Amino acid sequence: MNTPTNKIKRNSLESSWQVKLLYDGDCPLCMREVRFLQKKDQGRGLVNLVNIADKNFNPDEHCGIDYASAMGRIHAVLPDGNILRDIEAFRYVYEVLGMGWVYAITKLPLVGKFANFVYRIWANLRLVLTGRPNLETIIAQRKAQGQCNTFVCDR
């Protein structure tokens, strides 16, 4: 029910976010992480979780990050429009939720580089490891269904 009170509450939650995390709602492992983050957020609305697999996903509402780019690696968007990628995105989300210690070691240059290297391997294998088709096939399916914005930014 969309009462004025619900609308005000929803709008205040939407405006209180400190980081927007783009995630793949069709990925079972990603959804596990999302549920964990939701639990840690405790309804405060600090992390705005955006499902890129949603048919209404619009890159224009998320700093132009298109579906293909968001599928290739994790993206987080800050309220000022800055975009964080890879381990930096996870680190920031965890910091916002008061769990910065989890990724704190990745602030060390060598550890951060290694963590990003490992993350990129994971990102490249994520679809195969979760039993899904490759990205090109998924994009072709979305285009056939009219669900894929063709705007492409860097990966």
Image (cartoon, grey):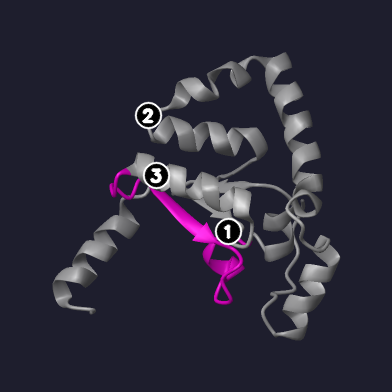
Nearer-N-terminus badge (3/1): 3
How packed mark 1 is, by other alpha carbons closer than 10 Å (few <14, some 14-19, many 20 or more), is few
Q: Residues within 10 Å of mark 2 (few under 14, many from 20)?
A: few
Residue 97 screen position, x and y as percent = 38, 35
Membership of 46 in magenta stretch:
yes
Judge left or right: residue 45 versus residue 127: left
Q: Residue at x 71, y 26 (%)?
A: 115
**Which residue, given by chain and number where applicable, does mark 3 sit on?**
18
Q: Which part of the image, by quadrant, shows the N terminus?
A: bottom left
Q: State the residue position of label 1.
A: 63
Q: Nearer the viewer, residue 41 or 48?
A: 41
- In the structure shown, which secondary structural element does the residue marked by tag 3 occupy? loop
Q: Amino acid at mark 1?
A: Cys
Q: Secondary structure at mark 2?
A: loop
Question: CA gap, disc 2 to disc 3?
Answer: 12 Å
Residue 39 screen position, x and y as percent: 37, 44
Q: Residue furthest bottom?
A: 145
Magenta-drawn segment: 42-64
Where on the picture, by quarter, is residue 40?
Answer: top left
Amino acid type at mark 3: Gln
